[in-house]
Structure formats: C-alpha cells, structure tokens
Image: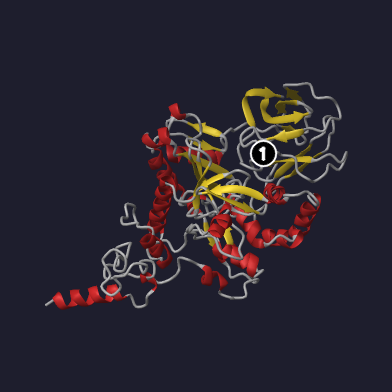
Amino acid sequence: MEKETIKSIVESHEGSKGGLISILEDIQKKYGYLSENSLRTVSKETGSSLVDIYGIATFYGSFSLKPRGKHLVSACLGTACHVRGGPRIAAEFESALGVCAGETTEDKEFTLETVNCLGACALGPIIVVDGHYFSKVKISDVKRIIKKTKTGLDKVSGDKDDNVVPLEVSCSHCNHSFMDHQCHIDGHPSIRVTVSFGQKHGWLRLSSLYGSFAVESEYEIPMDMEINFFCPHCHSELNSPSPCVLCGASMVPMIVRSGGMVQICSRRGCKGHMLDLDGVNF
Amino acid sequence: MITLTINGLDVSVEKGTTLLEAAQFLGFPIPTLCHMEGLSPYGACRLCVVEIGEEPRSKLVSSCTYLAEEGLKVRTASERVVKARKMIIELLLATAPQSKTIQDLASKFDVRQQRFKQEYEDCILCGRCVRMCEEQMMAKAIGFRGRGENRSIGTPFDIPADVCRLCGGCMYVCPVCELRCTYNEPEKAICGGCANLSPPCLEKEGFDDMMCYMDPCVACEIINDKERSLKP
C-alpha cells in the first residue's frame, strides 16, 4: 500500500530536475515522517542512491525520520528566553514528558523540540504548543500546559448536528494549528491559511464546520480558480499531488486535531472534500 | 588558453584548470588534505587557500576548487595565506590531534602551539572516503548525514549497506584514522619529538619534512630512552 502511494508520488514528479526534495516533502506530508522503507522505495523508484536521499532527509530540519506526535511542543532557547530560564523550562518538559528534546513520547501524543527564537522575546520564556503561545512560563506551569493540551487547547463545544461538525485542523508539515480564535465564521473559530493565485497573495479564512463552504478572503478569488494554499506558520505549500475526485484539481490535506485528515479541493467553488477520521466517535 | 599570474610568474593554462593545478605546474607547493588525485575537488579542508586579486580587495579562496581566470593575480604564500593556513592546521589539529597526517602538516608548517581544546574526533569531514566510494569504487555506500555539528559520515540508518563491497578504499584514503605518534605524552597534540627538538640523528637541512615518516621515530626513541634512564 505504502509502496504504491510512494510510487505514484514519485511518478507525479517525474522529469522535474531536483524533484527529490519535493518527493520527500510529499511523503512527509502524507505520512508525517519519512520511514526507512519509504526512503528505500524512493531510492528504487528514482534511481538515486539511498545515501544521497538519506543525506538530504537528514540535512533539512523540516524532514523527520521518526514519527511525530499529535502535539508539537516547542521550547524556545533563544537568548532572551535562555537568560530567563528557558533551559530549565525545557528540562522540566523533558522530565514531565519523559523524553529528550527532539523525541516523541511513547504514546505518540507529544513531540518535544527546542527552537532558537520565536520572535516574542519580551514574553520569554516562551512555549508553543500546536501554534498556541504560552508566555512567561514558569516551571510550575509546565504540568498545566501539558494537561491543557491533552484536554484540547481550544475546546469548542461540538455541534450536535451529524452532518456539520467543527474541526480543529493543523498544518501537515509543522503541525501548527490553523485555528483563528479572533475571527469566527459560522459561530466557530475559523481556519486561517495563506493562499496565492495569479499575482495575489493573502489570507483565507474557512469555516471550521465540515460541510460548510463559507470562506472569507483578503482578495476576491474568481470562481473555478485553482489556488495554492500555504501554512501561515511554516510557509510550506499545502497542496498535495492527489487530485480532487470531482474536478481533478489538487487537494489540500490538513491534520485534524482529534485524529485523521481532512482534504479540501483547492479549486474555488468546488465542493470536493474528504474526511478521514480514525478513532473518533461522533 | 588562459593566462594568469602566480606569485608574479605568468603562466598559460587550459580552460578549466584549477589554481592548484596551475601552481603545482609551476612548482609552487600548496598543502592539501581533502584533495586527492583521481577524486573530484571538494574544497572542504581549506588548507589549499591562496590569495587572489589586488590588495586591499584580495580574498582567500580554496585553490583546489577555483578555476583559473584570465589575468588573475594569485599569491600562494603571502603573509595572509600563511597565517590562514597555520590557523587551519591548528584547528584541524584540535579536531583530530591523533592524526599523523595532520601532525606532519603541523610540523611542516611550523605550527608550534595548540590553543584550542582537543576533541580527538575520528573524522574531519574531508569527504575523501565519500568521494572514493562514489567515484572510484562506484558503490555510494557511505555519505554525509545531518548538518552542522551533527554532520557525520556513514551509511544510511547506520545499517551496513548492501552496496558496500568491503573494499576498504574509504579507510585507505582517510587522513585521520591512522595511529598517531604519541611520543611519551599522549595528551600532547603535537608529538614534537621529531620536529620541535633538534633531531639528534639528522642534523642536516632538507630532512625536516621527512622525520615524521620514520618508523620508529628515532628522535622519540632517544628521548624515551633518556627519560627512562633518568628514572630511578
């Protein structure tokens, strides 16, 4: 199964010079990490040697060779956070989660990483969990942050309608949340992403209700226009090579907080979307 | 043909010749470490730095990767080059003080001090083995992994590669994984026995570079014997 998928990803990049990074990005987007087998398959399919592929996969920080957890905890160790005790906070997270920085807990819930600056130095020490910033964190806050993450950082009372459910989605690359709590659509926090089409580049807010097609955008998007989606946090392109079953445009996968994936069609006006939730009871 | 000036001498070389080749053609010695005949130039060790251009806008480039340009003025042994080269050797020595090749370079280029913490790394990331494996052995079994301070050389996933034929070419070309000349102070970076003291047996000029190649090292032996006889 995995082999077939990787084969099709490689084929979609056929002929493009230097497509190796794009291939690896697509695999990472699909599986969340690069497994040994997937790298071997890529090597076989592209004809590049495993050494080169492994070299690239280990060189770039955006590639992970280990499965990532559901929640990404970033502890800032930049200069300002460092002098305010960032390393002690990071160490407290390490002991609370039982992992070292860069590792994932055994239950695949948390991945802990250290970063060098998050650009909010005045608020240090900073901890970011799935795109939620916690400022001036004290050692005593660590347990609370973990507990809060487990219960859901942005708890929204779920709609009881079976066809319309609010989703909390995050980037399939960096796992940062797309949820915008400042701006509500359909009475729920909206999903904010960056889009570009033609010469335009701006934000797009989607309704987080699955089944609702309400959108707001910085620029008017013409109907039937195929647009490129980007993560506002890591700026990586979200469009995947898999085509929409309705119109053939590329689909945009996003990670659903409670588990699974949601895919929406990148064409304005197309109602193609797919929801693949695993282990969620409605 | 391209005409350039190396240390004031005009030389004409074919297009595509590196500065290192041109300088060697004229007989100017440039030390190298990651460079190896038969392997593609890599420019990792920076030992072959030369100064190009006119003062004060001259700059240091690695001669093994820099292609000859028309009218280029190259200096292979200017003060700046010698200073940079000594610093590079000192840094290499701190990385892998046990390497005989690097010790010899230190002796040859008059590096007499070691101001950095010694790391005793078994790799200086010169990439000789990687290129040997790829270009001469056609195997591509080992390569660079990671980046920055986590950069290392090895097989993917640290699993023995099925393309490796155990030819040993990588070890053959490695400048670091040899046994070092420890003299009688293992913690000292530069053996010093051969180069830093006046050698008792070879007090002639012209042998300075050769002494460390001697096995066993005569100078060390004598000093060892002397110290042994001093002990009660």
Give the quarter of the image for residue A43. Answer: bottom right
Can you see residue B193?
Answer: yes
Q: Residue furthest left?
A: B232
Residue B178 x, y percent position in the rendering:
43, 71
Whether A64 is drawn above or below A196: the answer is below
Q: Is residue A164 left or right of residue B79?
A: right
Q: Mark 1, chain letter?
A: A
Residue A112 x, y percent position in the rendering:
51, 46
Query: In terms of depth relative to the viewer, which is nearer, A248 or B210?
Result: B210
Q: Indicate the secondary structure of the residue bearing disc 1.
A: loop
**Quarter of the C terminus of chain B within the rendering:** bottom left
Q: Is residue B190 left or right of residue A276?
A: left
Q: Is residue B24 left or right of residue A42?
A: left
Q: Which residue is mark 1?
A: A236
Residue A133 x, y percent position in the rendering:
52, 32
Residue sitting at x 58%, y 70%: B160
